[in-house]
Image (cartoon, rainbow, N blue to C red):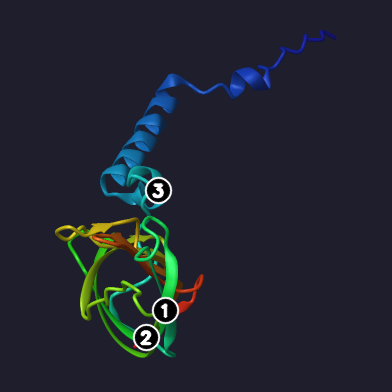
Amino acid sequence: MFRFAKVPSQSNKTKNKAKPSQIIPVVILIVSIVGALYFTGFFNDFTDTSISDGGKLTPTRDIEGTWTTTLSTQFTFATDYENFGQLTNVGSEDRTMTWTITGTSDEHIVIVNIQFTYSNRQLVQGSGYTPDVSPMQLTGTINGTQLTLTKGNAGPIEQIGTIGVFTFTSNQMEGTWHDHWNGVYEQNVYTSTNGLKLMKQ
């Protein structure tokens, strides 16, 4: 009886090897899908806004509206009236504030109109304090949940630094007010650290 030698089967490697005619259509399909998603803006949500937008973050909560102090807040006055170039505390007053915040064409910039009333004002004689004016209009820059208030120079009055930095949620805000400027005399009106608290109405 004749015995036939067994023909060796193809290796699995050879069997499973993909052909170019199978690979090319799949690659074209994947590239087409990714391209379509890119041009429809699908990947925009995954970009790092802190890098693509100059380090400023999109506001995370709606800050526009009316904000008020729930309790009067003590503001301290310092001037260099007695010692030129050296600020000295010369008095204080309690203020209640209403802020009206409105947006601008730049989502990071808001206009902050501030009205306030005061009580319990106490000043040393010859304080040199120049009273703040109500209402006042400030510019706010939003970075995430942080609001920074600024004011430009006005005539001979040179603004020094920011007016204050505040953090906010959807209905609460707190921060430190420090309105520091230099004219004929130097003056700073400030609160304690995080001493100014407001609620959204």
Identified by mark 3, the residue type is: Ser
**Residue 151 placement: quadrant:** bottom left
Residue on which the image places disc 2: 95
**Residue 66 placement: quadrant:** bottom left
**Residue 1 placement: quadrant:** top right
Q: Is residue 67 above or below residue 157?
A: below
- Residue 148 position within the rendered picture, expressed as x and y whole percent measured from the top left: 36, 62
- Residue 7 position within the rendered picture, expressed as x and y whole percent measured from the top left: 71, 12
Towards the viewer: 169 or 131: 131
Q: Residue at x 34, y 59 (%)?
A: 162
Residue on which the image places disc 1: 91
Residue on which the image places disc 3: 50
Residue 145 is at least partly visible in this image: no
Query: Mark 2 packing: few (<14 Cα in 10 Å), some, or many (20+)?
Result: some
Q: N-terminal of the two: label 3 or label 1? A: 3
Q: Is residue 193 above or below residue 152?
A: below
Q: Secondary structure at mark 1?
A: strand
Identified by mark 1, the residue type is: Gly
Identified by mark 2, the residue type is: Arg
Q: N-terminal of the two: label 3 or label 2? A: 3
Q: Residue at x 76, y 13 (%)?
A: 6
* Cα gap from disc 2 to disc 1, whole angstroms: 13 Å
* Cα gap from disc 3 to disc 1, whole angstroms: 42 Å
Q: Residue furthest right?
A: 1
- Residue 48 position within the rendered picture, expressed as x and y whole percent measured from the top left: 41, 47
Q: Residue at x 34, y 49 (%)?
A: 44
The answer to whether the residues at label 3 and label 1 have Cβ atoms under 8 Å apart is no
Q: Is residue 51 above or below residue 173?
A: above
